Image: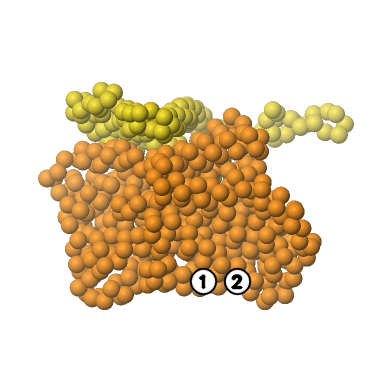
Chain colours: A orange, B yellow
Amino acid sequence: MSLILILAFAALMVAVVPVAHALVIASATALLWDGRLPLTLVVQQMFQQTQSFPMLALPFFILAGTLIMEGKLGQELLRFSGELMQRVRGGALSTTVVGSVVFGGVSGSAVANASALGSVLIPWQKRQGYPAGLCAANNATSAVIDILIPPSIPMILYAVVSGVSIGDLFLAGVLPGLLMAGGFVAVCWWNARRLDLSTEAPPLDIRHVARLAMLATPALILPVLILVALRFGFATPTEIAVMAVLYALAASLVIYRDMSWRRFHKAMIDAGIATGIVMMVIMGSAAASWILTYDQVPQRFAEWISTTLREPWLVIMAMNLIMLAIGGPLDLAPAILLLAPIFVPLAQQIGLDPLQLGLMMVLNLGIGLYTPPVGTTLFISSTIAGSTMGETTRALWPYFFVAIVLLLGISYIPALTIRF
Amino acid sequence: MTHPFHTAPVASGEAVALPQPPPRSALLIAADRVDGAVAVLCRGVLLVTGIVLMGVLTANVIARYVLATGGFDWAEEVPEQVFPWFIMAGVALAVQHGGHIAVEWLLGRLQRGGTRIVLLAGHALVIGAYAFLCWQALEVGEIVAIERSPALGLPKTYGYWAIAAGCALVALSKAMVAVRLAVIGPEAMPRPSPEEMPT
């Protein structure tokens, strides 16, 4: 039954059927082929996913992020990041990196981040003399920092599939997110030095910086509030996501006075569509996972890999290579939902912490977002910058290097994955 | 607002007739109307269910710290009933916006005609599958009518109705995209905006 499922799924993917629909149709085909189990199982598995309380966090974290990023609060965050970085060599490029860190604290989507920051910063960076391809590469790669800094939509997906605590994953993502940002700032500095581009910024005005910091504070403290609320158990992750929405609404209404019914309406519809896209993949993969588990595929795969490769470090390397290969053509959400049920038992078999695997998976599949030729943030950034895919890809290599070094670090150094 | 193809004022103050757009076929007009109706319905459902979910979850957090009972008994049951409607409205709207993620490796290797055939075949398959799923969801919904939630006494049927309605709307929206694909060609495929992309 699982073989039919895999073959049908592969055929449907090649035939450009969306992943979510391909999973549903392939599961139904496998059940029809087998004939022993009722077809209603597909609908039952789909329905079961809609009853998941933790998944309710998804639309509300997306909504909070949209409300903040598209309002004055988002603009203040960006001004603050620019002010901080503009005196550093390569500061114009680094503003995107730091912007991704601070935007990462309110948004959980790398694609939204790439679009929001790119549309404002790339034209400015080009005017400063940076090549379009480099601006695009910098934007495409920096956007992925967003999904390492809490709240993170991919981490919520992994948590739901693996059973790891959302709070633990959120906290564990902070250090790798900051390390990646540090590495990317170094790449920006190196690029500016290589291109002999110096900074022309006014002298530092502490009062001005302090004023900007104060205006950006409501957004800067949101990730801290989320982590504190999770750590001390004030509310469930879902309830915290709703609180984040109310916080964004209150800040927009009281401090920035830019909230309107129209903005709220649009943000809610966007959040609904994004939730629909992810949930449909979850619903489809639930039916497929049920069939794979029924045939004991994850357990057999885990046994086969661990007996073939024997050494845990080799198994981890193999998992990373598989994820890098799959993360290129397949989007982050379906890749997590397809791979996590197979990799979590394997991780447990070799003594790898599922939390560490979660970080590995999010970072590794995040690299897929800017892997040519189909990476989503790569495509968005190249479009905004007006660069060809070749120009952007040539500028990507130093960023790839930093990301791969960090990936290896997370894979083999458990200390980089902090627990509560 | 003046339609861009009708008339345009010129410096002398007179209006000059601009070229008329090619007339849209009755099929495309019908597809637009069906899509419009589905969009209004789904947007309404998203907004209402989203606000209800927010209200219930907020009230429960407040109640947990204010009431001695530590929250409302029904606070988890309302999302169980409402969330499926929110999700399925989003799923159907995502079809209209082209949001469901596909691997488009093959399309880059095909001519325009081949692309159209592959996309139409895929759409036909999805339409058939979701019409079948809609029927299956209604059947299971009838079976689970006896399972009632402890606090509110609501049957699980409503959740399955959401799945059924969502599947029907997915099939309908896919059919409308297929109409445009057949009449206009592959360039009629909808593309999502970055704000609608979840990751």
Q: Secondary structure at mark 2?
A: helix
The image quadrant that residue A132 belongs to is bottom right
Q: Secondary structure at mark 1?
A: helix
What number is the disc on residue A402? 1
Residue A27 lies left or right of residue A243; in this view the side is left
Q: Amino acid at mark 2?
A: Ala
The image quadrant that residue A91 belongs to is bottom right
Q: Is residue B70 visible?
A: yes
Q: CA distance from mark 2 to mark 1?
A: 9 Å
Q: Which is more toward the observer, A44 or A184?
A: A184
Q: Amino acid at mark 1?
A: Val
Q: Which residue is the site of mark 2? A: A186
Percent from the top left, x then y, of residue A256? 66, 38
Percent from the top left, x then y, of residue A316? 32, 70
Residue pictured at 59% horizontal, 64% vertical: A138
Q: Quadrant of the N terminus of chain B?
A: top right
Percent from the top left, x then y, of residue B61? 41, 34
Percent from the top left, x then y, of residue B46? 45, 31
Discs 2, 1 touching: Cβ within 8 Å: yes
Q: Which is more toward the observer, B128 or B121?
A: B128
Q: Which is more toward the observer, A263 or B8?
A: A263
